[in-house]
Amino acid sequence: MNRNILVSSFYPYRDFWLRLGLSVILAFFFVFLGSDSITGTIHGKYFIADLLSGFSLTFITTSLINIITSFLDDQYPWNKYFATRLIYQFIAAVVIPAIFVLAFMYIYLIVMLGLKKEEVAFFNTEFPISILFIIFWNVVYVGYFFYRQSKISNRELLSLKEKLFTLQNVKTGSDVIPTLPENNISNTIEEETDFTESNSTTKIKILVAVSGNKNIPIPVETIAYFYKDGNYTSLKTFQSETYLLNHSLDELMRLLEVTLFFRANRQFIINLKACHYFTNEENGKLEIHLIPKYDTEVIISQKRAPAFKEWLNK
């Protein structure tokens, strides 16, 4: 797949204080490793230099793994590209940090301090331990990735239960206003390929969404995208909250600001700010990657692609 990134952003793990504290602990650990006398080590010639270099090395290495892993989480998530991700993770987040550690300590011990290689225990003792720590830190991030995914799945399950409850209310004629019939609308959409927006100057700022037996006002600017979900219309906010709507996508395009929202296809209306990046696909089609992520591909046809690119530049 050609990954031409329009807007690429990834968010490093927020573990600054953990990495800082860990760097201090490991700095002392490596300084005193193999020491015959703690007092003698503290009063040693290179104690402060060794401590600072150990701290710097650990903090830079963990930060490097953080940035690399966050980037790979964004581009090659474990749950979608496991085999590819495993290879990339090993090369980028294990091999490269290990080479960095080796180069850092070689420069510090051999070049700066002028020690001879046979006089230095690091390459035979501390370096293998450093490799184990690098692998351990990778495992921590991988574990956290799947933990975070499980929390997202649980939220989606709760959202689905709410949606099912709402649909039951709609079918039984409760106080919830049912979604407008889609028969004629879907036929019109199936035949329509241009998705022409209305010239109406009345643009709404608030939409009333449905969650269970509640009607909830949602500010339009907080909505990432709208999509067809069977015979119903749903929206997802930038906070990954999902709600039902009593409007078809055609009706929404007549109500929304066209400089902010774009009709991507028969199933989707997307907010400009929700467009993470897009990739060029075969036959001139575009695949849109959204924030928050959607479970399936969001494709813009070859005919709609020029309009989409023009919309981005408005």
Image (cartoon, rainbow, N blue to C red):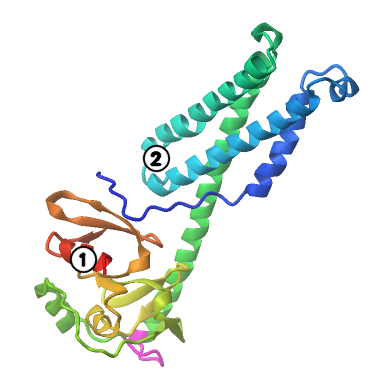
The secondary structure type at the circle numbered 1 is helix
The secondary structure type at the circle numbered 2 is helix
Q: Which mark is residue 226?
A: none
> Image check: 4 left or right of 153?
left
- Please indicate, yes or no, whether residue 181 appears anywhere in the rendered image: yes
Q: Please give the name of the residue rendered at 54% of the width and 51% of the height, measured from the top-left corner.
A: 147
Q: Residue furthest top?
A: 118
Q: Quadrant of the rendered structure where residue 143 is? A: top right
Q: Residue furthest left?
A: 191
In the rendered image of this protein, does residue 208 appear above or below residue 29?
below
In the rendered image of this protein, does residue 266 appear above or below residue 106?
below
Count neighbours of disc 1 (C-alpha within 10 A) and say few if under 14, some if 14 to 19, many if 20 or more: few
In the rendered image of this protein, does residue 272 appear above or below residue 257?
above
Q: Position of residue 307 (x, y in %)?
A: 18, 66
**Which numbered mark, 1 or 2, is in the foreground of this view?**
1
* Prevailing secondary structure of the magenta residues: loop
Mark 1: which amino acid? Glu
Q: Which mark is residue 310?
A: 1
Q: Position of residue 218 (x, y in %)?
A: 43, 81
- The C terminus - image quarter: bottom left
Q: Position of residue 62 (x, y in %)?
A: 59, 38
Is residue 269 on the magenta stretch?
no
> Image check: 50 left or right of 175?
right
Q: Which residues are magenta?
A: 170-178
Residue carrying label 2: 82
- Please indicate, yes or no, whether residue 229 appears anywhere in the rendered image: no
3D distance between C-alphas at marks 1 and 2: 36 Å
